[in-house]
């Protein structure tokens, strides 16, 4: 149930003189002819006004986001606030924080994950609410690939055990005396000439396959949806398999680099009993993807009975202390370079969406872009359910207000459709009341939200919350 205070709140609210001044400062497009009243009027309905400066987009952050990425948001148009201190967020920027629906106020237009995996974001629910979720494909892949290569070495030589042993000897004053004698306890093997199976040949998997080939390994890969872009990165000698079972059969090392997807047809426990029972004795599993991909009990059996190894940057209650595991903190993407690149890409994506309506790198919305809005036009974006007739209904509303659509694009993905429409505002001798057209369009059955990208940053957003109008 939507609180009554949310309904029709700002429609009748006149803009303050300060906001009008800001509109004039930010846009010179035919203000004399056009009235766009998208001030929110009563700020207290959305949150504490003291946490928001009207006229700016507010970005709510979770986790430590690289300052280089945050610098992409110019102070003149954006303010950045951490977690709970952001009461009127227009967009959310996060890393691994497990986001709940309650942390996404009605004002939020978009969410960007500075990283690859979006399993910490309730993506399906966000789609129902008409909110695009973005990620940063490839931005941290090199960092993860380097740790996978390091992981193969950690799984081949008893490096961690050796370090711990030397520390303990050092504390007893025995390091020098035992350094040669004790090395026999920590012997290992080389990776050159061994076989690596890479499950998932995306940004990380393809780069891992290429570097492993350079290190003299035989590489086998499995990815049922290999993209052309990633196929071009693969080493010539790679052997592509048609199943995980056949890829791992002769592998000494297995690296999983696939997304974690819950539910039917997903990847939960994909490295399960059946797969693990076909591992070669002594096979090393590298998991720098997600802990939930692996059936811990099945893997424990492999580690117990076959001298296999597990190297991962995800905690596991059953495996973290196993003598044959090396479990690190979630460090795959924790390099300066990866943090900068992911935050910068996420910031660019959010800015593009908020300022122009363009959609790229979204995991739930269709990629969409129109050329710049023509002169004397105003851009509408409308998120709808992917059902027949929506375009026609919208066009009717524009026509009823004598507004000509200069250019438009309609894209759909799954249950959602996204529309960008540039509407001619020249040649109108009377004031065109965009807020009324926006309300009519937003309240059409099947519309989720709409924006008029014009004027003061942070304004012009409306939602249809199950029949209640929210602006
Ligand atoms: N440890 C870390 O810090 C860290 C950092 C980045 C990414 N990750 C994890 O690694 C995953 C992969 O990252 P990426 O950047 O390579 O993503 P990506 O989207 O570029 O690649 C994923 C690949 O997996 C393939 N795939 C999906 N399901 C598969 C299946 N069942 N079997 C085989 N292949 C399958 C896809 O077709 C795609 O090519 C992410 O989803 C994330 O969970 C972890
Ligand atoms: O999916 C990812 O990109 C990684 O798991 C990185 O997570 P992080 O941003 O929390 O380091």
Image (cartoon, rainbow, N blue to C red):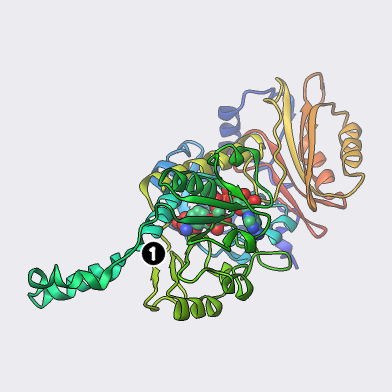
Which of the 4 quarters of the picture holds residue 393?
top right
Q: Residue at (49%, 43%) from the top-left corner?
A: 210
Q: Nearer the viewer, residue 262 or 375?
A: 262
Tell me if residue 422 comes above or below residue 129 in the rendering: above
Is residue 87 visible in this depiction of the protein?
A: no
Which of the 4 quarters of the picture holds residue 190?
bottom left
Q: How many marks?
A: 1
- Under circle 1, the secondary element is helix
Is residue 197 visible in this depiction of the protein?
A: yes
Q: Position of residue 91 (x, y in %)?
A: 58, 49
Q: Residue at (70%, 61%) from the top-left corner?
A: 125
Q: Residue at (51%, 38%) from the top-left corner?
A: 77
Q: Is residue 51 left or right of residue 386?
A: left
Indicate yes or no: mark 1 CB to ligand 1 under 8 Å: no
Q: Is residue 467 left or right of residue 282?
A: right
Q: Position of residue 404 (x, y in %)?
A: 85, 26
Q: Position of residue 76 (x, y in %)?
A: 47, 36
Q: Nearer the viewer, residue 401 or 223?
A: 223
Q: Nearer the viewer, residue 98 or 448?
A: 98
Q: Position of residue 59 (x, y in %)?
A: 52, 49
The residue beneath circle 1 is: 155
Where does the N terminus fall, quadrant-wise? Answer: bottom right
Q: Nearer the viewer, residue 410 or 14?
A: 410
Local crowd size for mark 1, using a 10 Å CA cut-off: few (<14), some (14–19), many (≥20): many
């Amino acid at each position: 149930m939507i609180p009554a205070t949310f309904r029709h709140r700002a429609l009748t609210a006149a803009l303050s003189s300060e906001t009008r001044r800001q509109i004039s400062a930010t846009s010179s497009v035919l203000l004399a002819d056009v009235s766009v009243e998208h001030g929110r009027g009563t700020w207290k309905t959305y949150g504490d006004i003291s946490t928001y400066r009207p006229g700016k987009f507010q970005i709510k952050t979770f986790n430590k986001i690289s300052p280089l990425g945050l610098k992409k948001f110019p102070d003149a148009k954006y303010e950045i606030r951490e977690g709970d201190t952001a009461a009127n967020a227009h967009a959310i920027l996060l890393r691994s924080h497990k986001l709940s629906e309650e942390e996404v106020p009605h004002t939020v237009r978009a969410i960007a994950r500075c990283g690859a995996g979006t399993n910490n974001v309730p993506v399906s629910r966000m789609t129902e609410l008409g909110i695009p979720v973005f990620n940063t494909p490839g931005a941290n892949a090199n960092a993860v690939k380097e740790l996978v290569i390091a992981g193969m070495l950690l799984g081949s030589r008893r490096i961690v055990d050796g370090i711990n042993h030397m520390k303990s000897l050092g504390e007893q004053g025995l390091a020098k005396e035992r350094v040669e004698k004790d090395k026999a306890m920590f012997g290992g093997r080389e990776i050159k000439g061994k076989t690596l199976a890479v499950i998932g040949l995306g940004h990380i998997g393809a780069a891992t396959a290429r570097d492993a080939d350079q290190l003299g390994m035989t590489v086998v890969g499995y990815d049922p949806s290999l993209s052309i872009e990633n196929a071009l990165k693969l080493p010539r000698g790679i052997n592509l398999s048609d199943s995980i079972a056949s890829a791992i059969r002769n592998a000494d090392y297995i690296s999983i680099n696939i997304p974690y997807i819950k539910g039917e047809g997903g990847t939960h426990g994909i490295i399960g009993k059946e797969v693990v029972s076909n591992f070669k004795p002594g096979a090393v599993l590298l998991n720098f993807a997600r802990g939930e991909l692996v059936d811990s009990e099945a893997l424990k059996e492999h580690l117990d009975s076959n001298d296999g190894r597990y190297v991962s940057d995800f905690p596991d209650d059953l495996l973290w202390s196993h003598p044959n595991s090396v479990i690190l903190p979630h460090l795959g993407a924790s390099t300066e370079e990866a943090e900068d690149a992911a935050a910068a890409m996420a910031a660019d994506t959010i800015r593009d969406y908020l300022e122009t309506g363009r959609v790229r790198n979204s995991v739930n919305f269709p990629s969409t872009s129109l050329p710049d809005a023509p002169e004397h036009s105003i851009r509408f974006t409308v998120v709808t359910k992917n059902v027949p007739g929506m375009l026609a209904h919208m066009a009717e509303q524009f026509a009823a207000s004598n507004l000509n659509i200069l250019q438009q694009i309609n894209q759909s993905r799954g249950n959602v459709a996204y529309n960008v429409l540039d509407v001619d505002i020249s040649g109108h001798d009377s004031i065109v009341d965009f807020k009324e057209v926006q309300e009519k369009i937003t309240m059409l059955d099947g519309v989720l939200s709409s924006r008029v990208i014009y004027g003061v940053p942070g304004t012009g957003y409306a939602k249809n919350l199950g029949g209640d109008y929210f602006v």
